[in-house]
Image (cartoon, grey):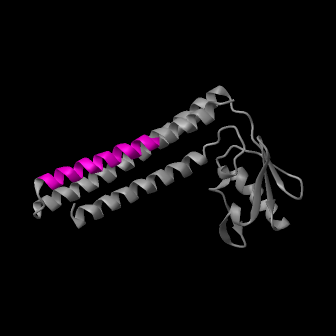
């Protein structure tokens, strides 16, 4: 394997790893009826004029399976945090006891569970498209290398290796989606 082919393979692999990381982040924000602090990862708070992630202005924990407790480091941040949660698309109603914000995670209806499974599958499909695009880019580069003097056998071997890599990552995506579906559908 030439140095150029190895470089393309490494870039393709790196791109696919980033896709898996992004999928993991996306799936973490799909709530499954259980309290999970990662549901709040996308929330930002107006902290003295700067948009700051919620995790940088408060402690977030789960006292039980259906409750998230947000303890701001400064009491004057309770209002902005409460407002950010209400304006988010999480569908949660914060309750404020003056010290902390409590989020009660409601049990999911069967219909809502099916909607969340569809959403998870859509995220999985987007990840698969991204992986296929990375494969296509690599194959295009191999074809260009062949025009520039790479042997046809080496080009075909590189394509086969890239396809194996693509299949491996597609399998990982399937596992992640299956695990999330089980998590959503478990009562």
Looking at the image, which is closer to me, 53 or 17? 17
Q: Give the percent coordinates (x, y) of residue 74.
A: 82, 68
Q: Is residue 61 positioned above or below 180 on the image?
A: below
Q: Give the percent coordinates (x, y) of residue 25.
A: 56, 52
Q: In which image quadrant can residue 8 be found?
A: bottom left
Q: In which image quadrant can residue 18 be found?
A: bottom left
Q: Residue furthest right?
A: 98
Quadrant of the image for the N terminus? bottom left
Q: Give the percent coordinates (x, y) of residue 24.
A: 54, 49
Number of marks in the rendered image: 0
Residue that appears at 74% across and 66% down: 57
Q: Give the percent coordinates (x, y) of residue 187.
A: 69, 29
Compared across the picture, whether 152 is left or right of 46 comes to left
Identify the magenta region. Answer: 153-173
Residue that appears at 22% across and 59% down: 141
Main secondary structure along the magenta-highlighted residues: helix
Looking at the image, which is closer to me, 164 or 139? 164
Residue that appears at 34% across and 47% down: 166
Magenta span contains residue 167: yes
Magenta span contains residue 168: yes
Compared across the picture, whether 1 is left or right of 61 comes to left
């Amino acid at each position: 394997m030439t140095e150029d082919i190895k470089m393309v393979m490494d870039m393709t692999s790196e791109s696919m790893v980033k896709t898996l990381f992004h999928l993991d982040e996306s799936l973490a924000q799909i709530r499954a009826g259980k309290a999970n602090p990662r549901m709040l990862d996308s929330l930002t708070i107006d902290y003295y004029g700067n948009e700051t992630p919620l995790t940088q202005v408060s402690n977030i924990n789960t006292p039980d399976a259906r409750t998230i407790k947000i303890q701001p480091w400064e009491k004057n941040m309770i209002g902005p945090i409460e407002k950010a949660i209400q304006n988010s698309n999480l569908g949660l109603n914060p309750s404020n006891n003056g010290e902390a914000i409590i989020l009660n995670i409601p049990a999911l209806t069967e219909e809502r569970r099916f909607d969340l499974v569809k959403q998870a599958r859509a995220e999985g499909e987007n990840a698969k498209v991204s992986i296929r695009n990375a494969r296509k880019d690599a194959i295009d580069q191999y074809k260009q290398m062949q025009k520039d003097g790479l042997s046809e056998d080496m080009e075909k071997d590189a394509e086969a290796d890239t396809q194996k890599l693509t299949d491996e990552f597609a399998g990982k995506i399937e596992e992640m989606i299956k695990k999330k579906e089980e998590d959503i559908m478990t009562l």
